Image (tube, rainbow, N blue to C red):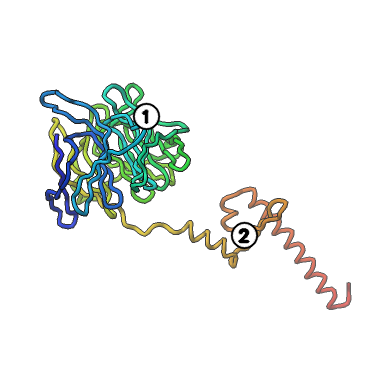
Amino acid sequence: MLNDVLRFDVKEESWGRAFTTGTPPAPRYHHSAVVHHGSMFIFGGYTGDIYSNSNLRNKNDLFEYKLSNGQWVEWNKFEGRLPPARSAHGAAIYDDKLWIFAGYDGNARLNDMWCVSLNGDSTTWEEVVQTGDHPPTSCNFPVAVAGDSMFVFSGQSGARITNDLYEFHFKEKRWRKITSDHILKGTPPPPQRRYGHIMVAHEHHLYVFGGAADSTLPNELHCYDIRDGTWSVITPSTDSQSPSGRLFHAAAVIGDAMYIFGGTVDNNVRSSEMYRFQFSTYQPCSLKDDFGNLLLNGKFCDVKFVLGEKRVEINGHMSIIIARCKYLHQKIEKAKEMLAAQVSEVNFKQSLSQFNLE
């Protein structure tokens, strides 16, 4: 096990050893590392001498590495209860807090959640009371934050291992299990159940790569559209150099690209490879916003709905309504016929008045 810090320059595509001061964390693995406001925060993990099998234990310590000056600082002045020591857990940043979920404590898998403020104004950990349909006890899974939610996909959960996707809403502190309707939608199924994989969020998509899936190491890149609720498999461009299947690798999103480093590949070989995946850089579709602005403007609307006792008026477009609702289509056609009949009657009376025949 190691406790050094290396840095990769994405522009120069080169590695270097980072400058450090202070007392670093003990060598460890299966810890978590997240970046927030110019610092990297390390929590937990498994320490000890794996070669002599001595002093092996999980940790629940929290260290901050300040990127600006390379200083290590241990956060060790907490009061009250601390999260149980663990490794292979999930960690995320939201609302200036570090959130820790599940993992392995050396005897059993967990599914508890803890959070702590990273603003320096808190000396206590808070155990989060979770509601809803939460994931089973698990470890070796990834988490990804998109908007106000954290997503968890698959992982090692004993006999109950699944390929389920879960969403945790931070503000409501509520979980929900996202069901896959791929058969009804005619879309690809979710990825196989797996562990040791990565998942990152970019815009309104989640990307899953690698891991061990039923004794195989797949290398397809799966994509989940958060808005549409559909899975798909990304087909790399023909000139791509795709990474082989692997597990326990690392991934990070920088700009419009995902970087994947290391991992264990075939025959239990440790990899030092770095791969870069360029996300699509198309302009986001503005059709929804355009139609919304068109309706709010009202200048080009040709139908108006009056709703409820308060007679709230809502603008609309006949062409859109007719295409989307058979019932309203029939009502509009009937109204047109009645209006045409009224116009015809008015025109007839006007013609009679011109000849004084009324």
Q: Which residue is mark 2?
A: 315
Find disc 1 in the rendering and name its residue. Answer: 111
Q: Quadrant of residue 160?
A: top left
Using residue 270 as the reference point, say whether residue 346 is left or right of it: right
Q: Nearer the viewer, residue 152 or 129?
A: 129
The residue positioned 19% from the left and 30% from the top of the image is 47
The kind of residue on which mark 1 rests is Asn
Asked if residue 27 lies left or right of residue 95, the reply is left
CA separation, marks 1 and 2? 48 Å
Residue type at the position of mark 2:
Asn
Instruction: State whether residue 262 appears in this view.
Output: yes
Nearer to me, 322 or 266: 266
Q: Are marks 1 and 2 in contact (CB under 8 Å)?
A: no
* Lateral position of residue 334 relative to residue 320, left or right: right
Q: Secondary structure at mark 1?
A: strand
What is the count of numbered marks?
A: 2
